Amino acid sequence: MRSAMDRREFLAGGLGVAGLATLSACGDGPAAAPPTSRDFTVGTSVVQIPVDPRRVVTVNTFPQDAMFDLGKDPVGVYDPGEQYILAAYRDRWSAIPKISGGSAGSALDLEKIAQLTPDLIIGIDAQQAPLDQLSKIAPTVLLPFTSSPTIWRELASKTADAVGRTGMLDPLKAKYTARAEQIKVDRAALLARTRFAILQGGLDQGAFWLYGPGSPAGAVLTDAGVQLAPSSAGVRKANRTVSLEEIAILRDADAILYYTNADGSPANNGPALFAQQAFRQLPAVTAGRFFGTTNLLPGSYTGAFGLQDDLDQALARVH
């Protein structure tokens, strides 16, 4: 654990260079003390992390959600705004100190993180968190997002590994697989003739975000037997930014799934997208096959369960 003097030096210097104190075993007995740290592999890097972390700060909602599923709440969480927090987690999330400014994309408050005296910090590589500065506070792992083939499932698995609760994922995995297979069977006819596009209003002016099979939502939908429309299926990475001038590419979709706030309103720049005449004239929109979900960005099994339910309800409304 970092000494009180180390913490004062870090806070006084803003981004100071206080290091972690080394934990050592005491006593004259022959028995060796159990290890207090271990190697944790992230991509091509190896980080020394606690064997049993007690004070974890999550600087992104993906590992935060995974920790909630594991029954191990962080001591500090990222604040993108309450509208982006799943209802299942909101009460627990609200009670935890926040380490960012309260809006999507807001900067991390490094002093607040240091004040929480974490023994482990977890984020994702896609958010470009200041790894060198965070590592001066506590061991820090940025889990793979941009290069992961399964994204949310791998993030959940790596988070469970980091906090020592890997076995707790087994019943969640079984439930997820069973639900996906049930949707495939119950909605087989609809799935055979319906192609979905997946989108989010996004944060870029004059554009929206289109999601592909490698995105969290794309993975959940395809696991449940959904065919993606070519516009979504052709997205090489998790998502891509599409100009409003290219809305017509969505004409290949029989149905559209989009991201909403907790109150059901279109998230981000969704209202600007949906106000476009070209969007209102899309076949999926004019046919009423236009479905919102708060679970479009699942970072955990609970989020994936919610998306499975929303997909099933959407399919029930397809005609």
Image (spheres, rainbow, N blue to C red):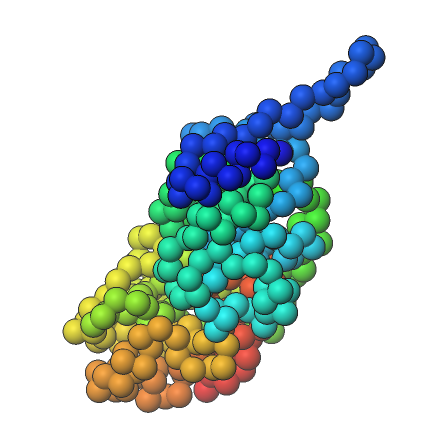
Question: For this rendering, which residue is in front, 10 or 25?
Answer: 10
Q: Is residue 116 left or right of residue 265?
A: right
Question: For this rendering, which residue is in front, 303 or 22?
Answer: 22
Residue pictured at 83% horizontal, 12% vertical: 29
Snapshot quadrant of residue 245: bottom left
Q: Is residue 176 left or right of residue 33?
A: left
Give x and y (percent) for residue 26: 75, 18
Residue at the left extreme? 245
Give x and y (percent) for residue 67: 61, 53
Give x and y (percent) for residue 163: 63, 42
Residue pictured at 23% horizontal, 84% vertical: 276
Q: Is residue 193 visible?
A: no
Q: Is residue 197 above or below residue 109?
A: below
Q: Is residue 64 above or below residue 182?
A: above
Residue pictured at 31% horizontal, 75% vertical: 269
Q: In what quadrant of the picture does the N terminus appear? A: top right
Give x and y (percent) for residue 288: 40, 88
How many numbered discs?
A: 0
Snapshot quadrant of residue 206: bottom left
Q: Is residue 209 visible?
A: yes
Residue pictured at 32% horizontal, 68% vertical: 202
